[in-house]
Image (cartoon, rainbow, N blue to C red):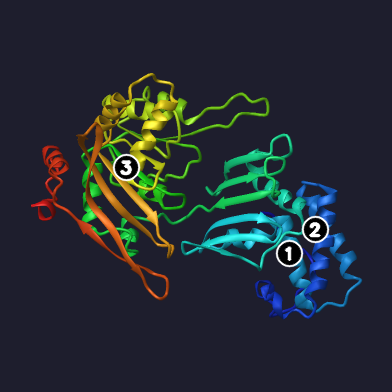
Amino acid sequence: MGKSFVDEFNVKEENINIGDVSDYDSFKDKKLLDELREKIIQNLIDKNTNNQIELSSLAKKEVESVLEEYDLSVIERSYVNNLIDNEINGYGPITELLEDPSITEIMVNGTNDIYIELDGKIIKDDSVSFINQDHIIRTIQRLIQPIGRTIDTSNPMVDARLLDGSRLNAIIPPLSLKGAVLTIRKFKKELIDVEDFLRNGTMTPYMARFIEACVKSKMNIIVCGGTGSGKTTLLNIMSSFIGNSERIITIEDAAELKLEQEHVISLETRSANYEGSGEVNIRALVINSLRMRPDRIIVGEVRGKEAFDMLQAMNTGHEGSMTTLHANSPIDALNRLETMVLMAGMEIPIKAIREYIENAIDIVINISRLSDGKRKITSICEVDGFSSDEIKLNEIFSFNQTGIASDGEVIGEFNFTKSSNKTYQILKSRGIDSLKDIFE
């Protein structure tokens, strides 16, 4: 960002902090301030200039012209100029939401319909608003312009990773009947580690030790769960257990995994260009990764035909591979895998597909976001052969909800069964002998 517009505009006095002017309710005439804001911002939208110097100069003239007509206090003038500064050097009304580290997701559904995720809960933020649909689209354009993307009626949808690592999805008419819709999943600068999961009660020490042993022994693992349940975060934690000497290839739509090992190759998909060509999808990257001599392949999320190639990699010597998929339980995850393999166009009987999955997958972990916003690993299962032509899952760890407290917090308990003879024997055969106190 360039020099602050507020710094150039002489409306401040000593001991006045621009950050203090956010107390909107204390202003004597809120309607007047809204009118000023709308008039100035609409003029900026109408001028449609992207040059930073020209925009700053234009905004200064507009503000001077408008404020001359009104008798405002210094703090009210500062408030208006702070909003305009966000339009020029920031990202409009959501600038402060983007800067707030406690907010993990921002959802703009309309001009006065903005939601945020805070501490795992989605709440409406009535303190933020846009003046019209053009204002929302202008903000989207400012967000994606630095990464060389654009959005308009001929290209009305964009899914991209911003420069700070945050993930943006935007869709506008004619695809969106509600108007412009913007969703931003913010990038966490400080990575969550296994200690955070233990401290937050997401899993138990036994579960952490078991997962670590499975990763180190090169078992193939699937993490499943719903949207925002923490699948990618858990995958990142699991990846931290991989040895530093291994060659790891990560494949994602938008790079979110942050591995700290020395030998990591990160691959990211590419969308089609304006002419509809040049797309490189997950499947193409998975196929290509097999030629790159990987020790581990980590796919951020499988959604379609690439599931077959991922399973093929797991079945042909690339042990220790990991991925995530959307599903509400381990058995749902395996059923989805069946469907995705069929999407690949392979004329394979269902029984053969199930055998393929059973041979490829060792462990399925389910993580959920509960009604109180907290995340829990609700199930860890081993794939244990067949029963009546169905893949058999043996649950080793689970979380069972028993009630809800008066404050809305979910009450429950973690459970553990020692019946995991298959996985434990595999772990011991691969030199992992650290779980005796758990299973023996």
Q: Looking at this view, name the residue that lies furthest to the top.
A: 347
Q: What residue type is labelled 2?
A: Ile
Cα separation between marks 1 and 3? 50 Å
Horizontal and vertical percent for residue 324? 39, 41
Q: Mark 1 points at which residue?
A: 83
Outermost residue, left direction? 440
Pointer 2 residue: 41
Q: In this view, does 296 lie to the left or right of 77?
A: left
Tag 1 and tag 3, C-beta contact below 8 Å: no
Q: Which mark is first along the chain, 2 or 3?
A: 2
In this rendering, the answer to whether 17 lies above or below 167 is below
Asked whether the residues under the numbered discs 1 and 2 touch, taking CB atoms below 8 Å apart as contact, a structural biologist would say yes
Q: Which residue is drawn at 65% across and 72% down?
A: 19
Reading the image, the residue beneath label 3 is 331
Q: Give how far across and how far down residue 401 sits, in percent.
A: 32, 62
Q: In which quarter of the image is residue 383?
A: top left
Instruction: State the image coordinates of residue 71 (x, y, percent, origin top left).
Output: 87, 77
| Residue 260 visible (yes or no) | no
Disc 1 versus disc 2: distance between alpha carbons?
Answer: 9 Å
Q: Nearer the viewer, residue 360 or 277?
A: 360
Q: Is mark 1 on a helix, strand or loop?
A: helix
Type of residue at label 1?
Leu
The label on residue 382 is none
Compare marks 1 and 3 and give the one earlier in the sequence. 1
Which quadrant holds the N terminus? bottom right
Name the residue rendered at 21%, 46% in the picture: 213
Nearest to N terminus: mark 1 or mark 2? 2
Q: From the viewer's side, name the closer residue of 49 and 404.
A: 404
**Nearer to us in this view, 277 or 222:** 222
- Label 3: state its secondary structure: helix
